[in-house]
Image (spheres, helix red, strand yellow):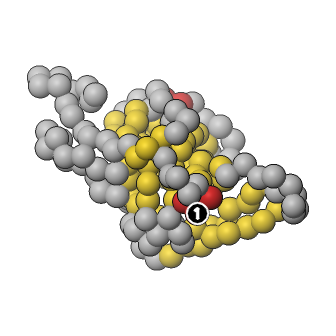
Amino acid sequence: MIRLWPAIFVMLGVVTLSIAQDHEPGAPSDPVETLVHTYGPFDLKGETLQQVPAVMAITFPEDMWLVGYHTQIVDGSGRRLPRELQCHTFIGTSMPQHHSHENVTGIFSDGYTPGIDLPVGFGIFFKSGEKVVWNPMFNNRDARKAAAAMRIELNVIRAKNLPQGLKPLETTFRTIRGSTDLY
């Protein structure tokens, strides 16, 4: 049996996304659920780095812990494309500014880190109805145009399934002075 519950992805309107969880009624359940969404495809210019489509906003219908996420670059049919088309990915409550040293609820990664599973006991907490932004960024080093989408899998746990909660993590966005690389 497959149970569905909705999460909302917003981009110039509202799109409802149904998320499947495999679960047999009465069977012990793993509290981790996987939400999946594909954003795009987008027409990427040739020889252009950091191409950023419109940022999406996600709202969860209840308090959630993010415990991992995984991304893939795919074409319009869902077939995997080269990882080099992925630049960065940010998921969080607000995009941190360079050099501000502000801490925000979220996680930021580069294209060579297509997935992160947080250590057991840790998570990123999002409140019910809180706007969570997803900012996928693309690269295209090839001279030809490319069409690419980003598929994301969010591994979440409903807060009500964890009475003790998890140790919350935050992120910051810092750049080493004199360098264009982000750390």
User: Where is residue 41 shown, x and y percent of the image?
Assistant: 55, 53
Q: Residue at x 49, y 47 (%)?
A: 166
- 160 relative to 103, above or below: below
User: Where is residue 11 shown, x and y percent of the image?
Assistant: 44, 68
Looking at the rendered structure, the number of numbered marks drawn on it comes to: 1
User: Where is residue 138 shown, x and y percent of the image?
Assistant: 42, 41
Q: Residue at x 44, y 32 (%)?
A: 111
Q: Residue furthest front?
A: 164
Q: Residue 136, can we see it?
A: no
Q: Residue at x 44, y 54 (%)?
A: 125
Q: Quadrant of the C terminus?
A: top left
Q: Which residue in the structure is indicated by mark 1?
A: 160
- 148 relative to 2, above or below: above
Q: Residue at x 46, y 36 (%)?
A: 86
- 83 relative to 64, above or below: above
Q: Is residue 140 left or right of residue 39?
A: left
Q: Is residue 26 left or right of residue 51?
A: right
Q: Amino acid at mark 1?
A: Lys
Q: Residues within 10 Å of mark 1 (few under 14, many from 20)?
A: few
Q: Quadrant of the N terminus?
A: bottom right
User: Where is residue 112 shown, x and y percent of the image?
Assistant: 46, 27
Q: Nearer the viewer, residue 51 or 57?
A: 57
SS of the residue under disc 1: helix
Residue 51, by quadrant, is top left
Q: Nearer the viewer, residue 28 or 150?
A: 28
Residue 56, by quadrant, is bottom left
Q: Is residue 87 left or right of residue 42?
A: left
